[in-house]
């Protein structure tokens, strides 16, 4: 073999090696890009559900806010001097999806006012005088749109607090089903529901009951046979 032939063969070998390394480098870059692409795509796919979930949460919150707007068909009205009746009223509202209205005294009752052992306490003198009508301090509510009204209060000296008489005489309950309920340490509802019906003069007042935090509210409501 001549020297020129050997040089030609050697040059061809080097050119072949250079071409081989070039092809290997291109293949490596292509594989690198294909590996990154699915990762980027996956990240974008994961972002979409998060965004969707956030929007759904906002929509749900908006729906909840709409549900709490006043104007439902059921209303729970209550007077609660110590918080006991308020707790039961909220249980009824939760079970029925009702709106609530709290009767607040214009002159709040103090602990001394509620002392039933004191014959000169405010509540004692009020309950002994059936003509007393304590002023309601909470803003007056419109009963338009309500067909069923639960009316709750504590039992004082065997009867409804006189401020409940104020409430009964202040509204027109025509066409509404009125359901009295009370809370008490032991006394039943007694004649308080009938008293309120007489003071109101309007509305369909049905027989009420004494309730507590242990009452099965759903069962009690079902037993009313309102439908």
Image (spheres, helix red, strand yellow):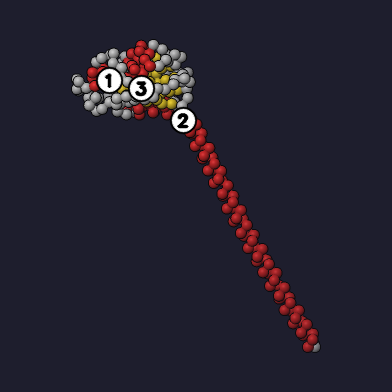
| Residue drawn at 27 percent across, 22 percent down | 186
Answer with mark 3 or mark 2, whichever residue precedes in sequence: 2
In the depicted structure, whether residue 31 falls above or below residue 148: below
| Residue drawn at 32 percent across, 20 percent down | 135
Q: Nearer the viewer, residue 122 or 107?
A: 107
Disc 1: which residue: 156
Disc 2: which residue: 68
Residue density around tag 3, few if under 14, some if 14–19, many if 20 or more, within 10 Å:
many
Q: Nearer the viewer, residue 97 or 175?
A: 175
The answer to whether the residue labelled 3 contacts the one labelled 2, judged by CB atoms less than 8 Å apart, is no
Which numbered marker is on residue 152?
A: 3
Which numbered marker is on residue 27?
A: none
Q: Residue 53: x, y in percent? A: 54, 43
The answer to whether the residue labelled 2 contacts the one labelled 1, judged by CB atoms less than 8 Å apart, is no
Q: Residue 81: x, y in percent? A: 30, 26
Which image quarter: residue 103?
top left
In which quadrant of the rendered image does the N terminus lie?
Answer: bottom right
In the depicted structure, whether residue 6 falls above or below residue 158: below
Answer with mark 2 or mark 1, whichever residue precedes in sequence: 2
| Residue drawn at 35 percent across, 13 percent down | 199
Secondary structure, mark 3, is strand
In the depicted structure, whether residue 195 falls above or below residue 153: above
Cα separation, mark 3 vs mark 1, equals 13 Å
Which image quarter: residue 216?
top left
Residue density around tag 2, few if under 14, some if 14–19, many if 20 or more, within 10 Å:
few
Residue 216 in view, yes or no: no
């Amino acid at each position: 073999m001549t020297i020129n032939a050997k040089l030609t063969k050697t040059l061809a070998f080097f050119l072949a090696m250079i071409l081989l390394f070039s092809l290997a480098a291109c293949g490596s870059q292509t594989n690198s890009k294909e590996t990154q692409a699915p990762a980027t795509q996956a990240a974008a796919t994961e972002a979409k559900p998060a965004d969707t979930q956030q929007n759904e949460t906002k929509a749900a919150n908006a729906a909840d806010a709409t549900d709490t707007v006043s104007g439902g068909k059921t209303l729970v009205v209550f007077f609660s001097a110590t918080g006991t009746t308020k707790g039961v009223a909220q249980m009824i509202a939760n079970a029925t999806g009702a709106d609530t209205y709290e009767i607040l005294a214009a002159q709040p009752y103090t602990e001394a006012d509620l002392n039933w052992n004191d014959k000169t306490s405010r509540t004692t003198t009020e309950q002994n005088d059936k003509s007393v009508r304590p002023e309601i301090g909470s803003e007056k509510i419109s009963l338009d749109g309500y067909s069923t009204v639960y009316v709750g209060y504590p039992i004082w000296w065997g009867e409804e607090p006189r401020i409940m008489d104020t409430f009964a005489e202040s509204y027109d309950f025509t066409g509404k089903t009125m359901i009295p309920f009370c809370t008490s340490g032991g006394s039943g509802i007694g004649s308080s529901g009938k008293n309120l019906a007489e003071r109101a003069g309007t509305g369909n007042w049905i027989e009420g009951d004494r309730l507590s935090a242990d009452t099965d509210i759903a069962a009690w409501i079902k037993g009313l046979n309102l439908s």
